[in-house]
Amino acid sequence: MQNTYTLLAALIQILNNIQPINNELERSLIEEFKVEEIGKGKVILHEKDICKNLWFLCDGLLRSYHNIGDKEITSRIMYTGHIVISPGSFFTQTPATESIETLADCAVAKLSFNDLQDIYKRFPEFNYHTRLITEQYFYKQEQRLYMLRKHDAAAKYNFFLENYADYLKDIPQKYIASFLNIAPETLSRTRSKLGKK
Amino acid sequence: MQNTYTLLAALIQILNNIQPINNELERSLIEEFKVEEIGKGKVILHEKDICKNLWFLCDGLLRSYHNIGDKEITSRIMYTGHIVISPGSFFTQTPATESIETLADCAVAKLSFNDLQDIYKRFPEFNYHTRLITEQYFYKQEQRLYMLRKHDAAAKYNFFLENYADYLKDIPQKYIASFLNIAPETLSRTRSKLGKK
DNA sequence: TAGATTTATTGACAAATGTCAAGAGGAACT
DNA sequence: AGTTCCTCTTGACATTTGTCAATAAATCTA
């Protein structure tokens, strides 16, 4: 496994792009983030548990999902470079209404809610970075809202292709289908109509 | 019209609930926010314009909408107490992909992007407040994502009733329909099945 | 590699919703 | 009050998607 510094380089880069962070903050982040490798198919957050960690996905693929009746709905798909939390649960430290699982072998860097609050206390300027990051995720989430209002299954699948093409082969179609809010059979038919793109 | 202080009291309250703000910041906010009254049916942000303002909706009702082909889709409904922006446009100061219009006579307090940046510079701790507010809106947006994945029109309409019942009579049904991503005719039929709630 | 298990595909059909059209009901304006 | 315009409702029908079932394909496991 690579060292923490190397694995966190992408995260440090994201932060520096927002506004250069000072060495002390960088050192604290590298110190507080705990890197771990997680095999494919592991649930890193279970529904009803409190999301006590924020993960930076150094490498890999994740999905969040929740159950409605007997159906499982994939709500988000997260890939390398993403900051991963269950928003409602992490922000308010209340039980999660969704689970998060790995769709591939992953390397993640984990920061606990409490350690993050410490960092906010010691480096108030860090609020600026996370405000901008939250704004970015907010905007991306809005894109998904637009997607779900698209008229037909083909338009929704095209959204998926535009945004997640690189991960197409690694995500079981049934998950893609529920992410797009269509039946797996409909996705299968849509794909064959579009020529298996 | 009431004075700026009275109209902004609710906003100041929201901020103080997050973390008490000092007098100087409060004074600056009251000074920088410009209150105005806007009649029903006015477009306060036009698609393709840059969203240069953040509005605090002191009193009234707004919706955001965008066009897809010949269809108009209502993306958000915002009522008294909401902080209103077109997220993608305001955060990045790029052209908006949606418009915002009043659905009733409104009183708003307006703060320009530039004035907000000044406030961030003078009061870095304000990033903390807006980070938490952004997190809250992020979470509410996620609720709308869940709604759009609900199985049928009745479930979507129930979501609307649970979240916007107070504004039911003030929002034309065709807007509610597109917000829920169903045809106006379907909403009409769904309502009559549910007994006109 | 063989067998078991899960996932994807395809067909037939059902159900929900969308579309089009006509008319009723309200709101706004003169 | 009457006219006009827009929204809502209702019906008939078309279309899309969902559901169920059978089979094929792929993946996992021993």
Image (tube, coloured by chain):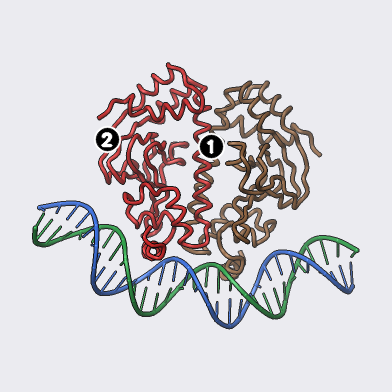
Chain colours: A red, B brown, C green, D blue
Q: Quadrant of the N terminus of chain A?
A: top left
* Residue topped by disc 1: A135
Residue A111 falls left or right of residue A1: right
Task: Identify which residue is drawn at 33% across, 29% down.
Answer: A7
* Residue topped by disc 2: A37
Please, what secondary structure does the residue beneath circle 2 have? strand
Q: Are marks 2 and 1 in contact (CB under 8 Å)?
A: no
Task: Identify which residue is drawn at 69% across, 28% down.
Answer: B29
Chain to which mark 2 belongs = A
**What is the number of callouts on the image?**
2
- Whether B108 is drawn above or below B143: the answer is above
- How far across and down, in percent of the image, does residue B170 sit? 70, 56
Chain to which mark 1 belongs = A
For the residue pair A189 and B27, the one nearer the viewer reads as A189
Residue D5 falls left or right of residue A25: right
Q: Amino acid at mark 1?
A: Glu
The single residue placed furthest to the top in the displayed view is A24
Q: Quadrant of the C terminus of chain A?
A: bottom left
For the residue pair B156 and A175, the one nearer the viewer reads as A175
How many neighbours does mark 2 have within 10 angstroms: few (below 14), some (14-19), or many (20 or more)? some
- Whether A164 is drawn above or below A3: the answer is below
- How far across and down, in percent of the image, does residue A131 sit? 53, 32
Quadrant housing residue A40: top left
- Whether B9 is drawn above or below C16: the answer is above
Please, what secondary structure does the residue beneath circle 1 have? helix
